[in-house]
Amino acid sequence: MTFKRWMRAAGGTALLCAASLAQSALPAAADSIRDRQWALSAFEADEIEKVSTGRGVTVAVVDTGVDGTHPDLVGSVLPGKNFLKGGGRADRETENSHGTAMASLIAGHGHGPGGAAGVQGLAPAAKILPLLVNTQDGLQVGTGKGGSPVSQAIRYAVDHGATVINLSLGDTFKITDLDDAVRYARQKDAVIVAAAGNDGVDEPNYPASIPGVISVGAVASSGEIWEKSNYGSNNLLSAPGVDVPGAGRDHGYRSGTGTSDATAYVSAAAALLRAKFPDLTAGQIANRLVKTAKLPESAEASKLPDKHYGYGFIRPYRALTDEIPAGSKNGPLPAPSASSSAGAADSSAPTDRGASTTQDRSEYVVWGVVGVLGLGLLGALAMVIIRRRRPVVPPPPPYGQQPGPDFRQ
């Protein structure tokens, strides 16, 4: 089944999985692209790079695939996997640029002398694991033998080393097996980031509305929320998502607006933190992002989390450098709950049921021996007490004699 509404675009054109509405080609001159990346200046990217670049962290981009041959992404994209019919790798996508754009915002390293030309991502040393779940015809949401493509991709991501999962996709329609896939990833301690949606309404959007997922809204360069960014009680953070340059088709560039781009930036910030603080849990990473987020002046009086901004727009440099207690392992995220299907998924981890059974039997034997010994000791003690309390009986007299009376009384 195909849902062409999956993050529907302006004018009714399906924009695949993403929450990037306005797209347009940018000038071919790559050296002009960096000047347009206003988010880098807002984030103080030059200062961030002195603290963390995301090295050693793998970010799964569950999307339309990624063009790993783009000059700004060469060497940063793993083969990944195509979860649609035909299978294969997902790092040679050329028909649609959405996943490539998201990857560039996360881990683009530019090109040319000093990497000064083209798109620079917020975590330029991170690796991208591309997982293709949709095409130009829309997202495939049908559930096959292994589950829906998105759910399979989420599970595949954490099983293949991704500690951050970028989901620049979503809809009001919830895939039936999505909850269990998210739960599985949370149990594996992955940071899961998803787009709030582009309808400008207070309406649940999935997977962003699933507990444990960081739901992201989009803001403009002013820090004010984008008018079509979905809102609601589940929004946790916001990030730049208006007129955002990114890598495009045919090694070119595009400009996008939507909560997809904002989601990519939050995923990149999470990658920076996971590289800087490898011992923190996913919840503690989210905690650092939340504690350092900021509301614009127009919303400073709002009760947190604000329904539009969540706890505010992210400030990655502060998240990396502020003194913040680690806090509880789940941070602002709910603890992942157990379920039968999640348990089944966890059964893929190495287990030894035979060893467990043997151990149980050994315990029964030990306790049986202890019980027998205990009963024996109690029996012996009882005999001693009985013998002490029993009256002394004199031996019988010799044959022919009868005992006489006792005059001692």
Image (tube, rainbow, N blue to C red):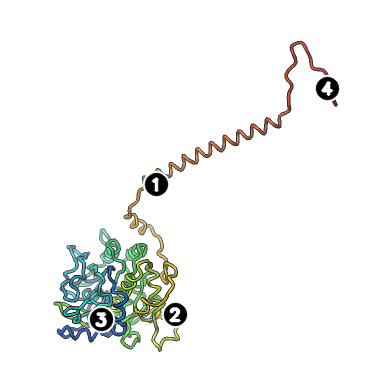
The type of residue carrying mark 3 is Leu
- Mark 2: secondary structure: loop
**Pointer 4 and pointer 2: residues touching (CB < 8 Å)?**
no
Residue 21, numbered circle: 3
Q: Quadrant of residue 14?
A: bottom left
Q: Is residue 398 above or below residue 322?
A: above
Mark closest to the chain's N terminus, 1 or 4 = 1
CA gap, disc 1 to disc 3?
A: 54 Å
CA gap, disc 1 to disc 4?
A: 71 Å
Label 3 Cα neighbours within 10 Å, binned few <14 / some 14-19 / many ≥20: many
Label 2 Cα neighbours within 10 Å, binned few <14 / some 14-19 / many ≥20: some
Left or right of residue 338, residue 162 in this image: left
**Residue at the disc numbered 2:** 304
The type of residue carrying mark 4 is Asp
Nearer the camera: disc 2 or disc 1: 1
Nearer the camera: disc 3 or disc 2: 2
**Residue at the disc numbered 4:** 406
CA gap, disc 3 to disc 2?
A: 28 Å
- In the image, what residue occupies the spot 19% across and 67% down? 90
In-front residue for pair 314/12:
314
